[in-house]
Amino acid sequence: MTTLLTTAGLLTLSNIFMTFAWYAHLKDLDKRPWILAVLVSWGIAFFEYLIQVPANRIGFSEMNLGQLKILQEAITLAVFVPFALFYMKQPLRLDFLWAGLCICGAVYFIFRGNPPT
């Protein structure tokens, strides 16, 4: 369980950086040239990769590739929804719930019968 928690923690932190790299420029740099947004996003993504690569290596020591990917997608949604609501000021939508339930189903099916140790 330690590997799962370590991987999930690192992927959560990585996803925070990733979400800001991918979407924050839409709010903060919308009036600036796109090339500046690219450079800022790459700078943020550098830190995401410094965390994401070790997270995946740690996770892959006990999880298969599918489990690692679905875990990452579940974490991405868990990070994205608060980001969309609180940072980007997007309205709360019932679609977030349906998407979350689909991801929960994916987590269940990919981990059943073969849980990480």
Image: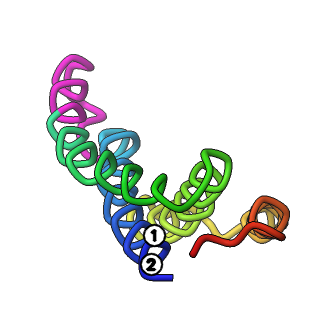
Whether residue 58 is situated above or below residue 27 in the rendered picture = below
Query: Which of 84/19 is in front?
Result: 19
Q: Is residue 70 magenta?
A: no
Please check the rendered image and state whether residue 37 is part of the magenta-colored stretch, yes or no.
yes
**In this figure, which residue is indicated by the disc labeled 2?**
5
Q: Residues within 10 Å of mark 1 (few under 14, many from 20)?
A: many
Secondary structure beneath disc 1? Answer: helix
- Residue 15 pos. (x, y %): 40, 56
The answer to which of 13 and 53 lies nearer the viewer is: 53
Question: 37 above or below 112?
Answer: above
Q: How many marks?
A: 2
Residue 57 screen position, x and y as percent: 37, 50
Q: Amino acid at mark 1?
A: Ala
**Residue type, numbered disc 2:** Leu
Q: Residue at x 25, y 46 (%)?
A: 28
Q: Residue at x 36, y 48 (%)?
A: 18
Q: Which labelled disc corresponds to residue 8?
A: 1
Quadrant for residue 97, please give it: bottom right
Position of residue 23 measured from the top left corner of the image (x, y, whole percent): 40, 43
Disc 2, SS: helix
In front here: 36 or 72? 72
User: Residue 86 location, x and y as percent?
Assistant: 43, 72
Horizontally, residue 37 falls left or right of residue 85, namely left
Tell me, yes or no, whether the two marked residues, 2 and 1, touch with CB atoms within 8 Å.
yes
Numbered range of the magenta stretch: 28-42
